Amino acid sequence: MHKKFIVEGGTILKGEVKLSGAKNVALKALAAALLTKEEVVIENMPDISDLHLMAQIVKSLGSEIEFMHPHHITMQTKTIINTTVDLDMGAHLRTSSMVIGPLLARTGEAIVPNPGGCRIGARPIDRHIEGFKQMGAEIDYNHDDGYYYIKAKKLHGMHYTFEKNSHTGTETLLLGAVRAEGQTILENAAEEPEVDDLISFLNTLGADVKRTKPRRIVINGKKELLGGTFSIMPDRNEAVTYGIAAYLTRGDITVHHIQKEYLTAFFDVLYDAGASWKELSNDAIRFYSDKELYGTNIETKPYPGFMTDWQAPWCLLMTQAAGESIIHETVFESRFGYVEELKKTGANIALFNPDVKNPHETYNFNWSDNRDHYFHAAKITGPTRLHNAILNIADLRAGATLVLASLVPTGKSILHGIEHLDRGYEHLEDRLNALGASIKRIND
Ligand code: EPU
């Protein structure tokens, strides 16, 4: 079925929105819940298609999952019935390889395809694999079928230093270490708040995991994990998306359930741009447009830096700001795919490669993956009057950006590829429509 959005732009968005649970915790919580035979209850789950795909993956391994409500599930895996992740399902989801640790703990074997996810670069898992080898796993990669074949009678604790930041790499090794024999210390571990939410979930199930320094995590392995109930943190990326929607449409949106402490880098850049916001309470922030914005200069970084997921909507916002803006993407090697689409709306954006003295240290991706010579920076000149267009969505965050871009000009825009949005944004069009947008979903 071909799905598309028809958007009538030009309306000012106003009102209130409540954030959903974080996609980048929810998917991993399902992998983590495989670690125990007991029943696990997970609340505040986002109603997104990636969650249903991840649920299918764990079900194929032996889990029983019941959706008590779209946001509330119970899951129990009395026995693992299968140790192979289906190629088609696994290749569509970055988190599919996170089942390695749980499968090894429960059966001694895991067979997982090289994982996929959004098309934003090579996205290898060498840092994850290296860690499992140090825990004593035997790993073969078969180039013909694209599968990792992993065996370990028992994983043992280890002292592992990540060469570079890896968000899911840290979480994947955590899921291996919580039931390994002895102590594991992860150095240069990722600091994203989603990692800490996963740690809280694991500790709820009886694991012993502590972050003893900002970039050090200490795990004391346990023989078994137990059942428990956990509620997923709110989604930071949604917060940024709705905040930017307010400025773009010269509107006024209050975002509820927001955890501002995890958005410091975003507020710093909003300040630089001259944007207005007001804290209404501990977890409610009003983003409102009352003046012109200025161009900004940003570099994406792992937490606590300006997040790579925010750069596409920020790039769009900067098309409306006065002067020149620069965005330097250092986390993924190819995350400007949306720029060609944005240009169809009249945006003035030029991609380039800045002069970087030490690319191996500056970039979070493996510099050797830069073989196709992607562009790593964008120069945006604004303000530009955007116009309607026919746009193609190729990945999740870029997709939300193109939806926002179609809200700015008056006139009708058509967006193809909206299944990418459904992967990670809960009912985006309904929630934008409730704020005053006019977006119609067509299923041809
Ligand atoms: N990398 C390697 N080898 C590895 C691991 C990572 O080369 O073994 C590279 C990646 O290719 C990338 C960089 O290192 O260039 C950073 O990767 P990281 O592992 O930190 O990112 P990720 O775990 O693949 C997660 C989120 C992303 C988010 C980033 C940054 C999930 C499922 N995905 O990706 O979210 O942008 O961390 O915080 O948690 C999204 O939600 O749309 C999304 C892409």
Image (tube, rainbow, N blue to C red):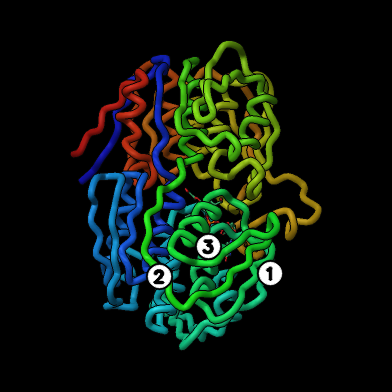
**At label 2, which amino acid type do we have?**
Leu
- Specify the quadrant of the image occupied by residue 361: bottom right
Q: Position of residue 111 (x, y in %)?
A: 39, 78
Q: Residue at x 59, y 52 (%)?
A: 332
Residue 8 numbered tag: none
The answer to whether residue 301 is left or right of residue 278 is: right
CB contact under 8 Å: marks 1 and 3: no
How many other residues sit within 10 Å of disc 1, few (<14), some (14-19) or many (≥20)? some
The secondary element bearing badge 2 is classed as loop
Task: Tell me the distance, in whole angstroms, between the alpha carbons under discs 1 and 2.
Answer: 24 Å
The secondary element bearing badge 3 is classed as helix
Q: Is residue 191 visible?
A: yes
In this figure, which residue is indicated by the disc labeled 3? Answer: 171
**At label 1, which amino acid type do we have?**
Thr
Q: Is mark 3 within 8 Å of ligand 1?
A: yes
In the image, is residue 14 above or below residue 191?
above
In the image, is residue 124 above or below residue 45?
below
**At label 3, which amino acid type do we have?**
Glu
Q: Is residue 116 visible?
A: no
Residue 35 numbered tag: 2
In what quadrant does ligand 1 lie?
bottom right
In this figure, which residue is indicated by the disc labeled 1? Answer: 161
Quadrant holding the C terminus: top left
The secondary element bearing badge 1 is classed as strand
Task: Tell me the distance, in whole angstroms, between the alpha carbons under discs 3 and 2.
Answer: 13 Å
How many other residues sit within 10 Å of disc 3, few (<14), some (14-19) or many (≥20)? many
